[in-house]
Amino acid sequence: MGQRHHCRFFVAAERIRHGWVEFTPAQAHQLTHVLRLRSGDRVSVFDGTGREIVASLTTATPRRVTARVIEELPLHTPPHVRITLGQVVPRGPAMDLIVAKATELGVNRIIPLEGERSVRRAPVTPSARWLRIAQEAAEQCGRRDLPDLAPACTLEAFLRSHPREAPLLACDASQASQPLMAVCQELGGAASLTLLIGSEGGLGCTEVEQLRSSGARLTSLGPRILRAETAALAALAIIQATVGDWGLLSVDEDGVMSVWGGQRAPLTR
């Protein structure tokens, strides 16, 4: 299982043309020096739009690797619910972790936010580092598409542009908050939803009032105080388990697990 993901690469769509794949120089080094693959070896390639192909290496040198397309796999069905994560950017490398794990957890859009208690200014445009982290996380977890990394904005701008029809769930430790799992269980038919997570200091009083005025539902994650990155990942896990694709797992008579995307994997016996 792990080896299969090591031989899976994100390749920009413009590098997949006319039945051939052209890897980047950095990928050429990884393929030949790290993985020690040679001409004739097969790899999986995805372009971030849902397309995935199997290709056979033809040229394999430390500076240049090309591959011939052998098979294009069937498209996945869309996710059961599209999830947007609005995250007030925390200090240090915590946002790197959030981007990586949110990608693994199936988030469709990540919006970096500047909040009332922000300790770090969010970049105006998504950083190249975050884009690379999302690509690497998708390579590892078998995901075919990439989350949309939106430009940073203030909470006020975020609320102005938020679609009114999509449920907005904001994690807040106030007594008025409802358990996130209970709220999610009421949203079984939602096609999309937005999760908002504050910074290290949580949401400010003004922000909570803005959220309430915009129709957001305040939710809690239990009695303990969680770090911003822990809160984001815990909340996403709850959402996927209650209204997302985790609830669509099934096992056939052969002990094979199927998920919404059509993948099949044997259960551990």
Image: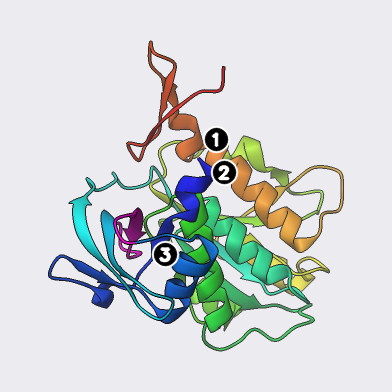
Residue 201 seen by the camera = yes
Residue 12 point in image, percent of width and height: 33, 73
Can you say whether 89 is above or below 19 in the image? below
Kind of residue at disc 2? Ile
What secondary structure is found at the residue carrying circle 3? Answer: loop
- Which colour assignment does the render follow? rainbow
User: Which residue sits furthest left?
Assistant: 18
Kind of residue at disc 3? Pro
Kind of residue at disc 1? Thr
Tag in front: 3 or 1: 1
User: Which residue sits furthest right?
Assistant: 224
Q: Residues within 10 Å of mark 1 (few under 14, many from 20)?
A: many
Query: In 3D space, how far apart are the residues under numbered discs 2 and 1 (Cα atoms)?
Result: 5 Å
Q: Residue at x 49, y 31 (%)?
A: 247
- The reply to whether the magenta stretch includes residue 49 is yes
Residue where numbered disc 2 is placed? 239
Q: Residues within 10 Å of mark 2 (few under 14, many from 20)?
A: many
From the viewer's side, name the closer residue of 179 and 229.
Answer: 229
Query: In 3D space, how far apart are the residues under numbered discs 3 and 1 (Cα atoms)?
Result: 22 Å
Residue 140 point in image, percent of width and height: 51, 54
Residue where numbered disc 1 is placed? 242
Q: Residue at x 63, y 35 (%)?
A: 182
The span picked out in magenta is 39-52
Residue 51 seen by the camera = no
Residue 64 point in image, percent of width and height: 35, 78
Residue 23 point in image, percent of width and height: 35, 73
Residue where numbered disc 3 is placed? 163
Q: Residue at x 86, y 43 (%)?
A: 223
